[in-house]
Image (spheres, grey):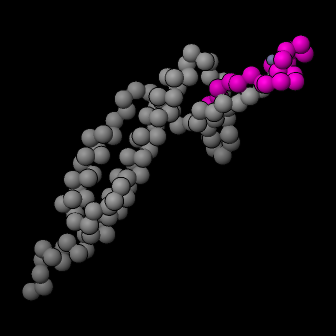
């Protein structure tokens, strides 16, 4: 996103994002990762060959990393929930940039509207 210079345009950009800033379902502030593990069965092929892939969610809470196993039939849904979080996070970052731009243009705008007498 390129931040516009004119406050009218900035406000228009902001309004458009405010309208999109609504969760379309559950949101998950976590990363979905695939981890390959050995199952523990000494006769299983994974002891020598390819390990079993499994899906996990990792997230940070109070600077500690947490992990939870995601059952295969939930993976697609979990993916949507994490994507929804990413979408809202991106919008929040863009709105922050735009609001900061609004603050920066405030002084110039005020000068333009109230010329020195
Ligand atoms: Zn195995």
Give the residue drawn at x 66%, y 46%: 63
Question: Is residue 92 in the magenta section?
Answer: no
As drawn, the residue found furthest toward the right would be 42
**Against 6, is 107 above or below?**
below
The picture places residue 89, in percent across and down from the top left corner, at 44, 44
Q: In this view, does 55 lie to the left or right of 94?
A: right
As drawn, the residue found furthest toward the front would be 49
Question: Is residue 55 in the magenta section?
Answer: yes
**Against 94, is 22 above or below?**
above
The picture places residue 62, in percent across and down from the top left corner, at 63, 44
**Against 65, is 117 above or below?**
below
Res 26 → quadrant: top left
The picture places residue 99, in percent across and down from the top left corner, at 32, 58
Q: Quadrant of the N terminus?
A: bottom left
- Closer to us: 64 or 34: 34
As drawn, the residue found furthest toward the bottom would be 117
**Against 18, is 73 above or below?**
above
Give the residue drawn at x 62%, y 41%: 60
Q: Is residue 91 left or right of residue 34?
A: left
Magenta residues, start to end: 39-57
User: Number of marks in the image?
Assistant: 0
The picture places residue 17, in percent across and down from the top left corner, at 30, 46
Q: In which quarter of the image is ligand 1?
A: top right
Q: In this view, does 26 lie to the left or right of 46?
A: left
Q: Is residue 104 left or right of residue 67?
A: left
Give the residue drawn at x 37%, y 58%: 97
Res 88 → quadrant: top left
Q: Quadrant of the C terminus?
A: bottom left
Give the residue drawn at x 12%, y 74%: 113
């Amino acid at each position: 996103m390129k931040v516009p210079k004119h406050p009218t345009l900035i406000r228009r950009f902001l309004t458009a994002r405010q309208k999109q800033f609504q969760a379309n379902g559950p949101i998950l502030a976590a990363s979905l990762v695939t981890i390959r593990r050995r199952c523990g069965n000494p006769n299983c092929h994974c002891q020598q060959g390819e390990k079993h892939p499994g899906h996990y969610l990792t997230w940070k809470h109070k600077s500690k990393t947490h992990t939870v196993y995601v059952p295969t039939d939930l993976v697609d849904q979990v993916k949507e929930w994490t994507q929804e979080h990413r979408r809202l996070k991106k919008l929040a970052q863009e709105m922050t940039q735009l609001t900061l731009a609004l603050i920066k243009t405030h002084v110039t705008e005020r000068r333009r509207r109230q010329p020195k007498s």
